[in-house]
């Protein structure tokens, strides 16, 4: 009997070791059809276009070729709303298997043990790794010697700029402004001199929304950068030796707020700037609400994005101009950093043995089949190949990959694009606008933006971030000054800076300065 019990205990011990060590198959929960369920939250390429339709052929291909039942959900359009959504899911321990995430939020999730280290994934997807993940990309998402996110480089050149309604300038007999005073006069005229000639008081000089983060943009964010540039305060961090640290400590920040308060008081900025989300803002300029704005080149000039404006205003015309020169000679369109789009894997997904399935999915995306499907859609429906073998929109109308109906099928294209000049040319060809008959060149907008003045802020994306209390205090305080709920006086401003230092701002600033020096980010004259 003792011998039997001993033998039984040994066998049970062996079985427990086998199953505790486990294999992917023993942990993974499959669907009734024997498929691996993977849930992905993605950042849509064109948020105002809507989510990928349920009839997207990619679902069937991924199911048949990879054995994966893919469920995808688009994240909100605003960066701050995306962060809130991810952080809320993390707090509820309800993150999807793989998800788009900003680096500051990723760092917090790493500290909480909610995302998986994925160092091994790069060997699992050699084709994708060779295309998208160089040493700098991998290093971008390293924490304490481990990698926690697949970072795909975005463009390293300027892709946004200051746009103005040239037809409004012409209607009012105004020249393109060059100085900040001239720019203000134009904004005032756009607000009060009926630039569209409709006889109604329904236009404003400038339009914006809050698009901020805790790395590059800061608060109030990039949509006010051309104005902030006139005071040398674009970007959350300043990297030049003489002013190294948080930009809010520069004297010009007070002067910027004073100028912006004048804009608000005189009513030359669309009053919805605090409540707009990205999609609201873009709907507003297409409806002719304001005549100056900071916008991304494809959001302005791509065929599907420009079409509503063209239909509403066939005689309308947007052009890119240099940012205004401030009273002390400063001028900048914005702060420029090398940016990345990051996808992370939840720890739960890794524990369920899904890491190699996620690797297979992302490796497939980097194949020719995945690249063309995600980037351009279905051949013959969303694109055709021209005589050079390049995707073309010829003869496809609104169902083309640049059309209003077709673009929803390529909402995942940022997962596969390499952003080369040749690819950009193919993705955004010149076209004839349907209503006005004008030839519109999206890459012409891009080229004009690249020629304007920018401020070097390389490394911002890896700078230390504050805790939630410090970030909240900072943003709420700046918002109060900008909106006028807190009077802007030198005394009130100094009180804010002193209190900011006490709640953690000083420690954050010192940590950032130390990081910038240690990582050779300081710019010398």
Image: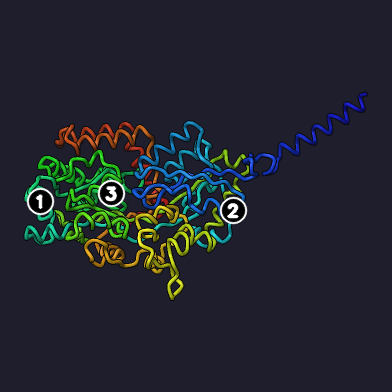
Q: Residue at x 83, y 34 (%)?
A: 11
* Residue bearing mark 1: 198
Q: Are marks 2 and 1 in contact (CB under 8 Å)?
A: no
Return the x and y of residue 254 as percentages of the image width and height. Answer: 18, 42
Query: Mark 3 vs mark 2: which is more N-terminal?
Result: 3
> Residue furthest toward the top?
1
Query: Mark 2 vs mark 1: which is more N-terminal?
Result: 1
Helix or strand or loop: what does disc 2 sit on?
Answer: helix
Marks 3 and 1, how far apart in space?
A: 31 Å
Q: Which numbered dot is residue 360?
A: 2
Q: Give the label, 2 or 1, closer to the camera.
A: 1
Return the x and y of residue 132 as percentages of the image width and height. Answer: 49, 59
Quarter of the image where the C terminus is located: bottom left
Q: From the viewer's perspective, is residue 389 above or below residue 214?
A: below
Helix or strand or loop: what does disc 1 sit on?
Answer: loop
* In this rendering, position of residue 460 left or right of residue 22: left
Q: From the viewer's perspective, is residue 515 above or below residue 137?
A: above
Q: Which numbered dot is residue 156?
A: none
Return the x and y of residue 162 as percentages of the image width and height. Answer: 22, 56
For this rendering, which residue is in front, 412 or 422? 412
**Could you classify mark 3 by the number of other residues whose Cα lies within 10 Å: few (under 14), some (14-19), or many (20 or more)?**
many
Q: Residue at x 61, y 39 (%)?
A: 351
Q: From the viewer's perspective, is residue 16 above or below residue 392?
A: above
Return the x and y of residue 47 as percentages of the image width and height. Answer: 36, 48
């Amino acid at each position: 009997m003792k011998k039997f019990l001993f033998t039984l205990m040994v066998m049970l011990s062996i079985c427990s070791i086998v199953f505790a060590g486990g294999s992917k198959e023993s942990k993974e929960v499959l669907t009734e059809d024997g498929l691996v369920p993977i849930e992905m939250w993605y950042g849509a390429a064109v948020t105002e276009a809507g989510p990928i339709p349920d009839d997207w052929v990619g679902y069937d291909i991924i199911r048949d070729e990879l054995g994966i039942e893919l469920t995808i959900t688009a994240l909100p359009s605003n960066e701050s709303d995306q962060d809130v959504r991810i952080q809320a899911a993390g707090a509820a321990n309800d993150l999807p298997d793989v998800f788009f995430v900003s680096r500051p939020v990723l760092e917090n999730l790493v500290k909480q043990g909610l995302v998986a280290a994925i160092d091994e994934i790069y060997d699992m997807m050699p084709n994708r790794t060779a295309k998208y993940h160089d040493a700098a990309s991998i290093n971008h998402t390293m924490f304490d010697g481990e990698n926690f996110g697949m970072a795909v480089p975005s463009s390293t050149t300027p892709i946004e700029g200051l746009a103005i309604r040239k037809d409004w300038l012409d209607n009012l007999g105004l020249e393109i402004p060059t100085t900040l005073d001239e720019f203000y006069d134009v904004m005032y005229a756009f607000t009060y001199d009926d630039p569209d000639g409709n006889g109604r008081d329904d236009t404003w000089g400038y339009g914006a929304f809050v698009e901020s983060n805790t790395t590059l943009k800061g608060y109030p964010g990039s949509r006010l950068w051309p104005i902030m540039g006139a005071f040398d305060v674009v970007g959350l961090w300043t990297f030049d030796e003489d002013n190294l640290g948080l930009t809010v400590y520069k004297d010009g920040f007070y002067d910027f707020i004073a100028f912006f308060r004048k804009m608000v008081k005189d009513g030359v900025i669309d009053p919805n700037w605090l409540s707009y989300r990205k999609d609201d803002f873009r709907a507003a300029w297409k409806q002719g609400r304001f005549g100056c704005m900071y916008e991304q080149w494809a959001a302005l000039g791509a065929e599907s994005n420009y079409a509503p404006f063209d239909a509403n205003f066939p005689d309308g015309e947007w052009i890119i101009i240099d940012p205004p020169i401030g009273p002390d000679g400063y001028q900048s369109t914005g702060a420029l950093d090398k940016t990345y789009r990051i996808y992370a894997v939840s720890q739960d997904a890794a524990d369920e043995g899904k890491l190699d399935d996620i690797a297979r999915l992302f490796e497939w995306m980097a194949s020719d089949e995945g690249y063309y499907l995600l980037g351009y859609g279905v051949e013959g429906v969303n694109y055709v190949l021209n005589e050079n073998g390049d995707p073309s929109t010829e003869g496809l109308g609104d169902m083309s990959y640049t059309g209003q109906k077709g673009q929803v099928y390529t909402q995942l294209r940022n997962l596969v694009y390499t952003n080369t000049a040749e690819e950009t040319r193919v993705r955004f060809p010149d076209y004839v606008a349907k209503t006005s008959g004008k030839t519109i060149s999206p890459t012409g907008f891009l080229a004009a933006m690249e020629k304007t003045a920018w401020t070097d802020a390389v490394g911002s994306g890896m700078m230390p971030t504050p805790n939630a209390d410090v970030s909240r205090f900072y943003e709420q305080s700046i918002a109060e000054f900008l909106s006028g709920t807190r009077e802007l006086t030198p005394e009130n401003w100094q009180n804010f800076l002193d209190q900011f230092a006490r709640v953690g701002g000083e420690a954050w600033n010192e940590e950032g300065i130390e990081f910038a020096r240690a990582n050779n980010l300081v710019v010398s004259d």
